[in-house]
Every structure is written in structure tokens, then in C-alpha cells.
Image (tube, grey):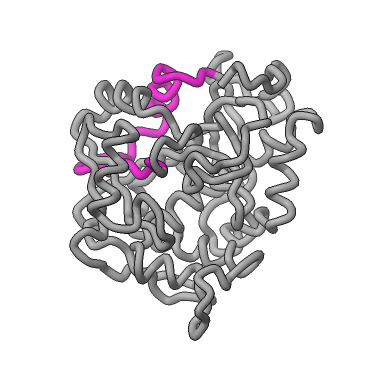
Amino acid sequence: MKKSQVFFTRDLSPEGLKRLYARISAPLTGKIAVKLHTGEKNGPNIIPSAWVKEFLGECLPDATIVETNTFYEGDRDSTEKHRETLKVNGWTFCPVDIMDEEGTVDLPVKGGKWFDHMTMGSHVTRYDSLLTLTHFKGHVMGGFGGSNKNLGIGMADGKIGKKMIHQREGSDDMWSIAMDELMERIAESTKATVDHFAGHIAYLNVLRNMSVSCDCEGTGAQPVVTPNIGMAASLDILAVDQASVDLVFALNPADNKALTERIQTRHGLRQLSYMKELGMGSDEYELIDIDHDDAVISPKEAVADVVPFSPFAL
């Protein structure tokens, strides 16, 4: 079986985004949505809006950033609050579609054991293609947030879909689903989006400012102690998340201890194994180093020159 391709660069900059995007852009046609986590107010670790502005301006001038409202109370649990937060965080240079602003739509989940559908923001059906632009980092419940989490939680609408994922029916605890079951529910939600955009979806993970906390924690996120690695992109969601996890685990133990512990203690690797069971991609991949003539390298080789973490490097 042919391995999936995952393209890798150490160049954490708008130029790096452009170069990686060129490798995965071919399937993205028509009206293109860009799903990224725009963050709570003043979140310190999100992908810099200035990077995205330059990248989209050159590569995707007609694209729309897409988001949904949150399930938890915060800066984005209503459309009005969400719009204000977008302004604070600098997402004012292109259209931002809060997809559940005008209701919901159900997309089928094929082969799921928890869901037969996932409820999404109704505007998802306005788009022909989707670029999943993800800040890879830890997550308090999911272990890590990669492309799978960005879509699984981020495309589900704020009141119905996210509740389906997080809260057991009949429970008053909005976080009553945890560990392996939560990973599976997230992946099934993601599958609805991946199947909907089949053949017209791509994934780009930015491994920078990787706190053990999600960007949903905003200024309350745990301090970053993991060094920056680079960026990975693929047309295979499982391959890009598997490669991103492998890159983190390939770091020296002193550099990855916090993040690998967060992934393992939350059973985050179940995201990967369940995506494989659902047929969402391959965990066998070639890591292609676009900085060095497309050499196929190992994750260990990719991080060989990573500079140990320094807070002054953020």
C-alpha cells in the first residue's frame, strides 16, 4: 500500500505557509473555506493573524475563514460575543463566517458507533472546499488538538453538535464524556466533515507555541515549555496528525515531557487509532522535507536541529 505524503518545513512564517500550501492546494476549488481556531480574547498562542493575512492575501484572496460558536461560556458562546472577539484578535482582514449563526444542518456519519449524524453550522453547505489550518497544541481533555480536533469540535455547532460530543444524554455535566469515548466521538464528528468535502479538503498543522492547553483557554493557557518544530501538511488527515504527534515524541525527553504526558494521560492517541478504524486515512506516511530538496526523512531527523525551548523565542 502506498504511503501518504506529509510535507514538512521548519519555516514558521507566512512564507512557510505559502510553500506548504502549494503542495496540497490542487484539490481546493470553487468557494473555499478555511477552518482555523481564532481563539479566545488575547489568546497568546494562536496562529498569528498577520501570518494568515499575508498567506490568504497571496494564495487564497477569495477564501472565507469559518468558525462556530462554543458550547462553554466564554468569549465566543454567542455570535455577538464571537464577533467582538474576532476583532480583538485581529481577524478583520477577510470575511469570517460563524457557520451556526443562522441555524444548523445534519451531516451523516458513516460507520460510526456513537453517531449516525453530526449537527453542524448550516453555512457549511455554502462551500465547495475546505482548508483545515490548525494550531497543533495540547488539550485539557483531548490530549492534543490537531486537524481532527479542529474539525471534530470546531465544525460542530455550539448548542447541539458540541453537546452531542461532550455531554452524555440525561447528564447535567457538560463535560461528562472523557478519555477513549471522547476521542471516538470527536473523530466521528470529523468524519462527517471529511466525507462532506471528500476530494476537496486539505490539512496544515502549525507546531508552534505548543502549550499543553488549547487556545480555547485563552490567556489562562498553561505556559509554553515545548520548543517550536515547524509545520506539516497533507491531503490525509490521519497522516498529518500522526506525523505531528510523531514529531513531538521525537523531541528530546527534556523538551517534550509536558506535552507527551498530556497526550498520554488523556488517551489522546485514541484519536489516531480510531480514525484508522473509521478508514479516514493512513498512519503510514512519508515525511517530505521541502526545505531540503524533498528528501524523505524521519521525525527524529526533522527535529534534530530544534532549539531547546526558551520563553524569549516565543
Query: Which of the 4 quarters of the picture holds residue 48?
Result: top left
* Residue 58 in picture, x, y percent from top left: 26, 21
Residue at the (69%, 17%) spot, across then down? 307
- Name the residue at the bottom extreme: 170
Asked whether the viewer can see residue 194, the reply is no
Q: Is residue 141 above or below residue 118?
A: above
* Residue 202 in picture, x, y percent from top left: 40, 41
Residue at the (73%, 34%) spot, across then down? 256
Q: Nearer the viewer, residue 4 or 265?
A: 265
Give the residues in magenta: 11-39
* Residue 61 in picture, x, y percent from top left: 21, 28
Say left or right for 121 vs 132. left
Q: Nearer the viewer, residue 69 or 303?
A: 69
Q: Is residue 242 magenta?
A: no
Residue at the (45%, 37%) spot, across then down? 43
* Residue 273 in picture, x, y percent from top left: 65, 58
